[in-house]
Image: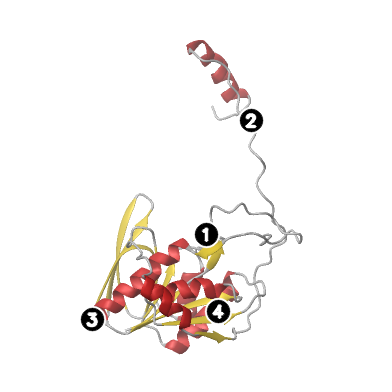
Amino acid sequence: MKIVVCVNHVPDSETKVKVGPDGKSIDRTGVNFIINPYDEFAVEEALRLKEKHGGDVTSISLGGDSHKETLRKTLAMGVDKAVLIKDETPRDTFSVARALADHAKELQADVILFGKQSIDSDDGAVGPMVAEMLGIPSVTTVVKLEIEDGAVLAEREIEGGHEHVETRLPVVVTAQKGLNDPRYPSLKGIMAAKSKPIEERQPTPAANKVEVVAMHKPDAKSAGKIIGTDATAVPELLRLLHEEAKIL
């Protein structure tokens, strides 16, 4: 089985992000970057599919040299090969998907795995776009995955419940938290990953469909208001909710 897992290199969610001087991107100074957390579930699932069905796993990331840090983590976890599609120019979701889809097509992958979304942009659209560009089915927010004799059985998380989906290979799957528990890289894996080569490829040219015109942090929350400490405050609370907050 040929398995591809696409990973992103994103700011740590605990990092205090600042808007950069251009007003359209973040200031990367002092920002700690990590593998996108949802992509860890995708990597783990790729490795489990390989262990069950055989084959090989290739991890792909699009970005600059800093993305090699994330690719090396996938190698340390057990991925066979890592590819950096090297491009540091700003790309929107469409142009990212175009570059990933074109390389995945070259690899003739049976399964292409993504995290359900990247925590930097949070749009959750790259995986389904890649599937559309390749003309293959996609199943998103998957929490359980079984593949037997080319048949794909997936359980996906939806609003208020779970949905069971059946399709066939090749397929794009996006991983949701709960699909598995990602393994920790072993010391042996970490040492081996340091010497494994990371192939560099040039991306497919693609014009952006969307332009970021401005970026800003949300307004600071206003201070809370204490109007009382016992039942006598209830009438005033109701008045404020009705007249000021306008939620009653």
Q: Earlier in the sequence, mark 1 or mark 3?
A: 1
Q: Residue at x 54, y 68 (%)?
A: 9
Q: Residue at x 69, y 63 (%)?
A: 212
Disc assigned to residue 149: 3
Q: Secondary structure at mark 2?
A: loop
**Type of residue at label 4?**
Arg
Q: Secondary structure at mark 4?
A: helix
Q: Using the rendered view, name the quadrant where residue 221 is placed.
A: top right
Most extreme residue toward the top is 232
Q: Is residue 169 visible?
A: yes
Question: Circle 2 is placed at which residue position?
Answer: 223
Distance between mark 4 and mark 1 Cα atoms:
20 Å
Q: Residues within 10 Å of mark 2 (few under 14, many from 20)?
A: few
- Residue 60 position, x and y percent, is 48, 78
Question: Circle 1 is placed at which residue position?
Answer: 119
Distance between mark 2 and mark 3 Cα atoms:
59 Å
Q: Nearer the viewer, residue 168 or 88?
A: 88
Q: Earlier in the sequence, mark 2 or mark 1?
A: 1
**Type of residue at label 1?**
Ile
- Residue 244 position, x and y percent, is 63, 26
Question: Circle 4 is placed at which residue position?
Answer: 98
Q: Secondary structure at mark 3?
A: loop
Q: Residues within 10 Å of mark 4 (few under 14, many from 20)?
A: many
Residue depth check, mark 1 versus mark 3: number of the one nearer the observer: 1
**Type of residue at label 2?**
Ala
Q: Earlier in the sequence, mark 2 or mark 4?
A: 4
Q: Residues within 10 Å of mark 3 (few under 14, many from 20)?
A: few
- In the drawing, does residue 41 fall left or right of residue 103? left
Which quadrant does the C terminus fall into?
A: top right
